[in-house]
Image (tube, coloured by chain):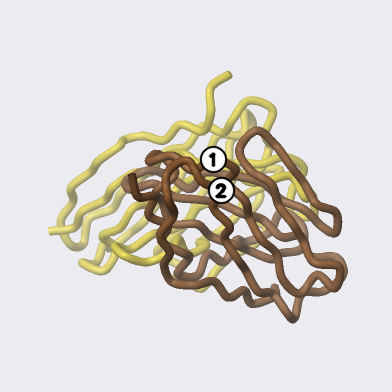
Chain colours: A yellow, B brown
Amino acid sequence: DAGVTQSPTHLIKTRGQQVTLRCSPKSGHDTVSWYQQALGQGPQFIFQYYEEEERQRGNFPDRFSGHQFPNYSSELNVNALLLGDSALYLCASSSQGAYSNQPQHFGDGTRLSIL
Amino acid sequence: DAKTTQPPSMDCAEGRAANLPCNHSTISGNEYVYWYRQIHSQGPQYIIHGLKNNETNEMASLIITEDRKSSTLILPHATLRDTAVYYCIAIYGNNRLAFGKGNQVVVIP
């Protein structure tokens, strides 16, 4: 049973570019959340997708956007990259939306470096 | 979501039980306590969660006080592979997880 998979594992971009990160949820899960983890900090919530809609959003600018597909996989897009966007981007999946108490399961993330 | 407080770091002896405390004095009645851990360069790993009753699984036990204002995660026989940052989170539903700084646990041989 495959867990949460993310691609790519590492990515290098330059300031001003755009990036797309991908996530496949654990089998049976229908909800995907994205987190940003800067070096030495805990993960920070970006947004959550359920039924192909953004249901919750953390304190991140509109440069961060996402999408969920009918097969529950998800993409995170970041436009106009800044040096401060360098971080580990984590995807977590779970079942039954925001009001279930089922735990979120995380992938190992995409390490994004901005030059 | 209720704020949680954990010690910033602690050491545990290999082979002994590790008891990781967490305070959540403002927890509300419908908020669960979740525990995750993060080993360097990996994503957070779900350990266990509970509402009122004590819980046990293959990884750990969770003891929640009767007033629910604090809890303890117990790793029954700590191994070197249990060295990680442990996060205690109190939250309603499958919502945005607020990780905080966590507790850096080092298992010493």
Quadrant of image for the C terminus of chain B? top left
Residue at image point 40% right, 39% down: B81
Mark closer to the chain start, 1 or 2: 2
The chain to which mark 2 is attached is B
* Residue B4, placed above or below residue A85: below
Q: Is residue A13 left or right of residue A112?
A: left
What residue is shown with label 2? B17
What residue is shown with label 1? B77
Residue A28 position in % (x across, y down): 69, 27
Task: Give the spatial CA distance, label 1 vs label 2.
Answer: 5 Å
- Seen as rendered, the residue at the extreme bottom is B26
- Seen as rendered, the residue at the extreme left is A115
Callout 1 and callout 2 share a chain? yes
Q: Quadrant of residue A26?
A: top right
Q: Tell me whether circle 1 and circle 2 mark residues in contact (CB < 8 Å).
A: yes
Quadrant of image for the N terminus of chain B? bottom right
Q: Quadrant of residue A99?
A: bottom right
- Label 2: few (<14), some (14–19) or many (≥20) C-alpha neighbours in 10 Å: some
Residue A15 position in % (x across, y down): 17, 62
Residue A4 position in % (x across, y down): 51, 33
Amino acid type, mark 1: His
Q: Camera-side residue: A61 or B81?
A: B81
